[in-house]
Amino acid sequence: MSTRDLSGHEDIEIDATLNGKPLKRRVKARQHLADFLRQELELTGTHLGCEHGICGACTVLIDGRTARGCLTLAAQISGKSVETVEGLTENGMLAELQKEFIERNAAQCGFCSSGMLLTAHELLSSGDSLSRADIRKGMSGNMCRCTGYHAIIDAVEAVMTTRARR
Amino acid sequence: MSHSASQATGIGARIPRRELKRLLSGHGRYIDDIKLPRMLHAYFVRSPHPHARIASVDIEAARRAPGVAAVLIASDINSRCEPFVGVALHRPGHRSAPQRLLAADRAVWQGQPVAVVIADSRAEAEDAAELVSIDWQPLPVVGDQLQAIAPGAPTIHPELADNVAFDFLLEKGEPAKAFAEADLVIEEELRFERQMAMTLEARGLIADFDPSDGTLTVIHAHQSPFQMQDVFSRHLHIPEHKVRVTAPDIGGAFGMKLNIYSDEMATVVASMMLGRPVKFCADRLESFVSDAQARDHRIKCRIALKKTGEILAMEMDDIGAVGAYGMPLRFNVAEGMMAITIMGAPYSFENYKARTRSVYVNKNLIGMYRGVGMPLACIATELLTDLAADKLGIDTVEFKRRTYRPKSSLPCVTPGGQRLETVSFHECLEKLVAMIDYDALRKEQSEMGKRGVYRGIGIATFCEQTAYGPPYYGPSGAPISTQDGCTLRLEPSGSVRCITSLTDQGQGTLTSVAQIVADSLGISIDQVSVSGGDSSISPYGGGAWASRGTAVGGEAALRAGEMLKQNILALAGTITQTPTHALDIVEGQVVNIRTGQPVISLAEVGRIGYFRQDTLPRDYDTQLSVSASFVANDKLYYMANGVQASYVEVDYDTGFIKILGQWAVDDCGRVINPLLVEEQVRGGIVQGIGAVLFEECVYSEDANLLNGTMADYLVPMSNEMPDIVVAHVETPETSTKLGAKGIGEAGLIGAMGSVWVAVNDALKPLGAKVLHQPFTPERVLDAIARARDSKRDGQVQRGD
């Protein structure tokens, strides 16, 4: 009978897609995705604010949906596609949001911004027309301690309006 | 006429923080993003007890754990660092016990570091820390301020006679007589629970001591690299010129990253002992138990008035529970002293009595956090005056109009000792009243009330001390510099490099400095790069804290800009054989001042100034790098002010409070960048709303923290927050050329005041008052139940 290593030190092989490129790696069973991205791959644009799923700073996209990088084990991304702020910046998917966030100074320290941008990206992806209250609700899983949220909501609204006009 | 480049990007322009493009691409370099070669990681074993004797510490198993480089305890570390004694020399009677880096034989708060594990990775350090075995013997706990001053209370520091750190009395005029003669006295007891700064990025540093040459480099997520250069040098006995502290991108600070922390100091000692870089970055739980906390006050306050509404006197009696030690360098008297000295400042009155006590409890240290004691003063003042006006049948706005200190009385010194010179209470109020359409809002409130929907309007006036000067910190004995400095260098290509002593944790101070430099030189901001936060390269300075960065560092930049401009014009005049006074710089060109015609480009001045000095007259003194420092050496502080309004709805059945509207009119002196100022005001407002409605470090009676996660410690998220309207009145500071005062804390101070008053306004129909912050639904319902009970008792008595 084989005994399984329950310490979390066991290595697990993952085969995933990261920012559009194949990723094959051995990861520690206990390492969460955000630590894996930051420590092993040096993708430090994904930030850690609480490491228990509340603040949203570690938000990434898994198969196109937002997920908490701190509540996802790296081992769980096998067979999935993960996108981070770095990848979505390079492929231009965040460009409109980034432009509006910057023009409105919808960030101060910038520590929450990766998560804010990815959450906004998902929120607007349906193309639905959202009220300001809808946007406030949709963004309320991401904490910003510097701004008054007002400029963030303005920026998301502006992108939505621009897209609706097209 | 088209705007020139400098007007478009200079003082007054709306320009986003220039670092945002980089930060929003995920390219920030925050402390935990940085790796150095051979770097080790520190993790602290902390006391699980608020107060306990340490009978023994066994670190042998931890030492043998995988990846561990060292496990250090008090006997390894403490003797290498001079202890901290957080006592202000200019406050007679102020006492604190010396604080060592690690608890040796006794821990005095839950979270105090006891041992540090240094390992190849953070995970290995945490694993090994599990193996440290400590024999704890719990001791009696002092849990709050009333326990601390109760007769027979255990004494936290046996070398002090009792738990009182500081006791200060203030009296002006004849308050006792005034209260005796008053037509109306309103008296309340207010409670403010402990809260956190809750920066999204927790604290952190990388200490890198090189034993080969004895130099210490610290990359520190800190607001004041110069302060820390001094602290590391002084306490660790390293010659100051061999200490360099730099600030990376910082994920929010709010004063909390201005304090001195024993775990951060111990990280530096570990690097010195091991001769390798050591990183310590707190996680969220560590942040809950070790970041300097704020507030924790009980305040009794009262006001005496004539029937006419004239204020005769005020009183405040404050007790703050400041934790287990005096905060090094920043002390533990600031919240209480600010509260009692700023109490009532916007209003005319002559008689005042106040007392503040700081007392030690077995809790984490209270330190600097946005607003310090100013919101407490604002809340007490505005709540009492609002309740008094209501009792006297005077509308609160009318009361303010009549009772604010008139412009004609300026400059003046308030009974609390505040010097008011250029404040603008009336202008701010009138602008606010127009902005919120006050009469219509009152009408709506009254109509909704008839339908059983209870709304409240709160208007709060505040004073904000900004940019403290040397008379403030100097006499305390703390080596805290309130000057700032700036070096400007014309590059050969004609652009300008600026090196400021300031830091930037998101406020946009470096962007403001770029605007000021661009403006003073007559060039576009695109031609100016600014770097700051490095104690080894710029002139000496303070950094960004106490709403001071732009006001002080901006003035230094302005003066450096004027100096560099004169040197450039002198050189341009020499090159072109034109008198200097006939030249100016416009849009990056040296022009003839009369005709506006270009005379020579800055690039050509730079080329000749750096590469062809041989073409200049013999002994020509070319100075294209200049430095300026600035401090207002006679000022305790500048005084900003403003007025805010909140419109809230209180659900009498659930106790829930909804913020329907929030408005701010702020006077921070000259506004350098309205875009940055407005969102900083809004950010402060949201923190202020959070403080009043949500934020509390919940402790058990015996000082165990019960809510050490962000799921349990609530902060404002976008869904609960309103849109916020911000407007400005600009009354420039007259003692500087720039005229900026400061903006960092204004939003929070005013919002805390206006939300307190608005919620209590919404409870007036019941005669209920909620006076215990945060206003959780439970506390609101308790207040409503108390009011209903006392009304029922009253009816029963009348029925008898």
Image (tube, coloured by chain):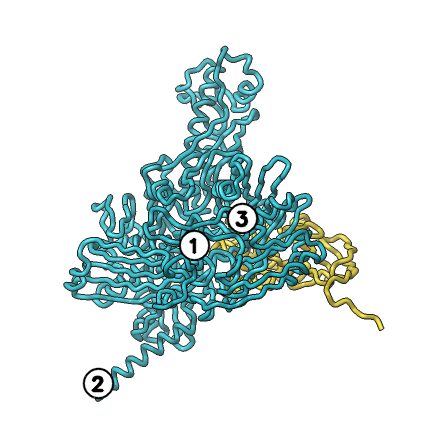
Chain colours: A yellow, B cyan
Q: Which residue extends farthest bottom? A: B800
Q: Which residue is mark 2?
A: B798
Residue B68 visible somewhere in the drawing:
yes
Q: Nearer the viewer, mark 2 or mark 3?
A: 3
Residue A164 visible somewhere in the drawing:
no
Q: Position of residue A128 (x, y in %)?
A: 59, 63
**Do the CB atoms of the residues marked 1 and 3 lie less than 8 Å apart?**
no
| Closest to the observer, B134 or B526 | B134
Q: Quadrant of residue B455?
A: bottom left
Q: Earlier in the sequence, mark 1 or mark 3?
A: 3
Q: Which residue extends farthest right? A: A1
Q: Quadrant of the N terminus of chain B?
A: top left
| Closest to the observer, B428 or B113 | B113
Q: Chain of mark 2?
A: B
Q: Look at the numbered disc 1 and give the secondary structure of its residue.
A: loop
Q: Give the alpha-carbon distance from disc 2 to disc 3, as whole Å.
A: 71 Å
Number of marks:
3
Q: Residue at left 79%, top 60%?
A: A13
| Closest to the observer, B308 or B280 | B280
Q: Which residue is mark 3?
A: B79
Q: Position of residue B13 (x, y in %)?
A: 45, 41
